[in-house]
Image (cartoon, rainbow, N blue to C red):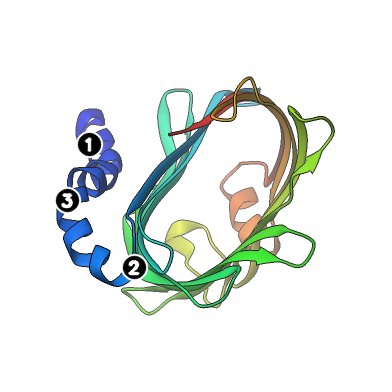
Amino acid sequence: MNRFSRCAALLLPFSLMFSSTLSAGEMMDGHDGPLFHVLRLQIDGAQNDEGGLVTWTGSGSLGGDLEKLVVKSEGEIQNGHVERSEVWGLYSRNISDFWDVQAGARQDFDPHAQTYLVFGVEGLAPYFIETGAHAFLARNGDVSARLEQSIDLLITQSLALTPHLKFDVSANDAPEQKIGAGLSRIELGTRLRYELTRKFAPYIDLVYERALGNTARMIREGGSDPGDLTLRAGISFWF
């Protein structure tokens, strides 16, 4: 797959979601009130031991208060080469004031192509901690899970500090992907964001990523360091 085709594949779910606003409105409006849509993007860059690093995180939703369609994408580019990329497509249904249950599919493009079924929840845990917890079932039967949490701590009306956490767990060894059973990867970060407007905010983010257990061993055997600390600078915006 060439670079143009890869980019098109990553952006296709977003374009399909927003080009289908009318048909989705006809499907949902009668059951769920007004139709809303939002697109959030976060892009940052850093310099690490291997050179230039660019990461992105994006999400889009289309629907009402009760039901919505959700698309997510995240990944990283190291020295112009896509090291990791994935796209999710989910149906999300509200089950309480602060929680949605979600089901759908996830497609990984890099470092290896893999398709997963996804089931999980997303919402606000106590103390306003934004939480996403999802389980994945791969086509070959491998089972894994991911937990993500973050909280916004307001310093001023425009300045916020956001500690964030993400970790991956695998029930199986997947040597071809350099993933070992157990807690395989953890990411800890602290992001300082300044909102120039409500929809546009530059930030800096100190992030520590580390592979653990058998995953770390596989990465070391491949000649790479299982841990990395980076100071990233980027922008986040939504519309």
Label 1, residues with CA under 10 Å away: few <14, some 14-19, many ≥20: few
Work out whether 202 lies above or below 238. above
Q: Is residue 134 visible?
A: no
Q: Which secondary structure lies at badge 1?
A: helix
Q: Which secondary structure lies at badge 2?
A: helix
Whole-number angstrom distance, CA of label 1 to CA of label 2: 32 Å
Residue marked by disc 3: 22
| Residue 121, image x, y percentages | 53, 71
Whole-number angstrom distance, CA of label 3 to CA of label 2: 15 Å
Q: Is residue 129 visible?
A: yes
| Residue 127, image x, y percentages | 80, 61
> Which numbered disc flags the more N-terminal residue, 3 or 1?
1
Work out whether 72 lies above or below 122. above
> Which numbered disc flags the more N-terminal residue, 3 or 2?
3
Closer to the camera in the image, 85 or 200:
200
Closer to the camera in the image, 93 or 106:
93
